[in-house]
Image (cartoon, rainbow, N blue to C red):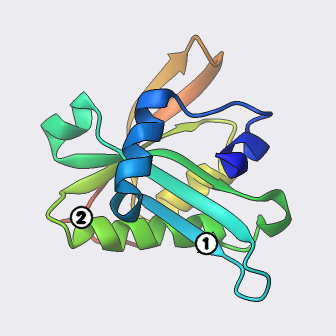
Amino acid sequence: MDFYRSLHQGGSIGWARRLVYTLLADRLCVACVNEETAELCGVGFYYFNRRDIDEGTVHEGFSGVKESFRGKGLGTLLRKTAIEHFGRSGIMGVSSRVSADNQPSLRSNLKLGFKIVEVYYDKGLEKERYYLVKRFDERTN
């Protein structure tokens, strides 16, 4: 939670998702740690929402890399690790929502074979966003 707060100006994950992540962290979270310093560099949190249950996918609820480690491919590595993990578990794919102005995250998703399936305006964030899906039965670039 401290890591999440550090990337979100002190904001936190809602209690329901926090409970799920606490109980199922070994199955629904991916982390990147600096081997030399044992410092947490990045995380990816995944969960199931109604749409994902209906479509057989798992949703990337949050993925973030500490500022000092950005631009080194860690975000892509986190997603790739999650794709490999969930691909072995019988899930059919991964979904993600990305703001149009978050080009590093969007590039990472597209590089790994995610396809934009919906473009919408999020009134709460006041941003254009993309809903992307990576199907495991499709080839990765």
Residue drawn where x is 56% and y is 34% of the image:
13
Q: How crowded is mark 2: few (under 14 residues within 10 Å), some or many (20 or more)?
A: many
Q: How many marks are shown on the rendered structure?
A: 2
Quarter where residue 75 is shown? bottom right
User: Where 38 sits versus 74, above or below?
Assistant: below
Looking at the image, is 107 positioned above or below residue 138?
Answer: above
Residue 141 percent across, percent down from the top left:
41, 73
Identity, as a three-letter code, of the amino acid under mark 1: Cys
Q: Which residue lies furthest to the top in this view?
A: 123
> Residue 133 at what x, y percent from top left?
34, 48
Q: Nearer the viewer, residue 94 or 50?
A: 50
Query: Under tag 1, what secondary structure?
Result: strand
Is residue 93 among the parts visible in the rendering?
yes
Q: In this view, does 82 lie to the left or right of 106?
A: left
Q: In this view, does 6 lie to the left or right of 16?
A: right
- Identify the residue position indicated by label 2 in the image: 136
Q: Distance between the residues labelled 2 and 1?
A: 23 Å
The residue labelled by disc 1 is: 32
Residue 133 visible at all: no
Q: Which of marks 2 and 1 is in front?
A: 1
Q: Residue at x 62, y 35 (%)?
A: 100
- Nearest the viewer among 122 and 20 is 20
In percent of width and height, residue 37 lies at 79, 82
Q: Where is residue 103 in the image (x, y as percent from the top left)?
A: 67, 48
Judged from the image, the secondary structure of the residue bearing numbered disc 2 is: loop
Disc 2 and disc 1 in contact, CB within 8 angstroms: no
- Amino acid type, residue under disc 2 in the picture: Phe
